[in-house]
Amino acid sequence: MLTLPKRGVAARVAVVGAILLAVACSDPFSLEARLDNVGTRANLWALTGTPPNYPAAFDISLVSPVRADGNLAFDFATDLESNGSIRIIPQAMLGQSLLGARVVGLRRVSGTYEALLEAPADGYSADSVLVVKVGEPFVARVRSQACSFQLSQELFAKFVVDTVIASERRMSFRTVIDPNCGFRGLGEGRPRR
């Protein structure tokens, strides 16, 4: 009969105990983000008063400015008011594509763009135009086809218009987009929730 030294058994018991302790202190079913947040700058032109080939819309899943054409392949379009305010127009308010309207909720937030590290859970409006001023941050919640087979089908992003060049009808935006379905973190790096 083979007998193990007592020190070997004690070491194995210690290792098994450490593993059980680690598992007991963490949530094995918690979701973890797989991708870092994406920050970028973009120029968008006004929907009115500019050539139709200028990008006047933004696609959050693609993290890209796009044309606001009849395909309606964007999340929101932008326009300028005569007083310099910026109109953020959800895609569904401009028409419905063959794939159906995108569900895009918009919300104004208080504080600064830099201080906004997590998107609010509620309070989004999907059926109205959001009017913001230069420097006023807003957030978007988009039901994305990229998240079709995930627990949550929503992506979140924060935006701020830094400058408006009225003579060109152009706006310069900054954005941070969380590409992880259902996560609302809007800081740098990988979000935690």
Image (cartoon, grey):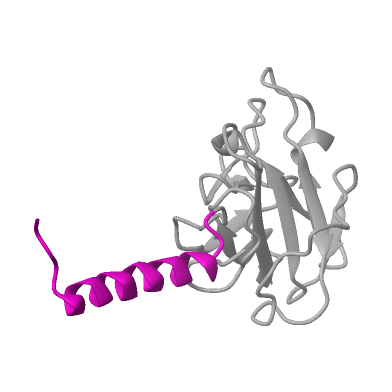
Q: Give the range drawn in magenta.
A: 1-28
Q: Image check: 56 left or right of 136? A: left
Frontmost residue, 119 versus 46: 119
Frontmost residue, 62 versus 120: 120
The residue drawn where x is 73% and y is 81% is 112
Where residue 117 appears, x then y in whole percent? 65, 74
Quadrant of the rendering where the N terminus is positioned: bottom left
Q: In this view, does 98 lie above or below 160?
A: above
The residue drawn where x is 23% and y is 71% is 9
| Picture quadrant of residue 171 | bottom right
How many badges with numbers are in the image?
A: 0
Q: Image check: 39 left or right of 170? A: left
| Picture quadrant of residue 174 | bottom right
Magenta: main secondary structure: helix
Q: In this view, does 41 lie above or below 94?
A: below
Where residue 182 appears, x then y in whole percent? 64, 51
Quadrant of the rendering where the C terminus is positioned: bottom right
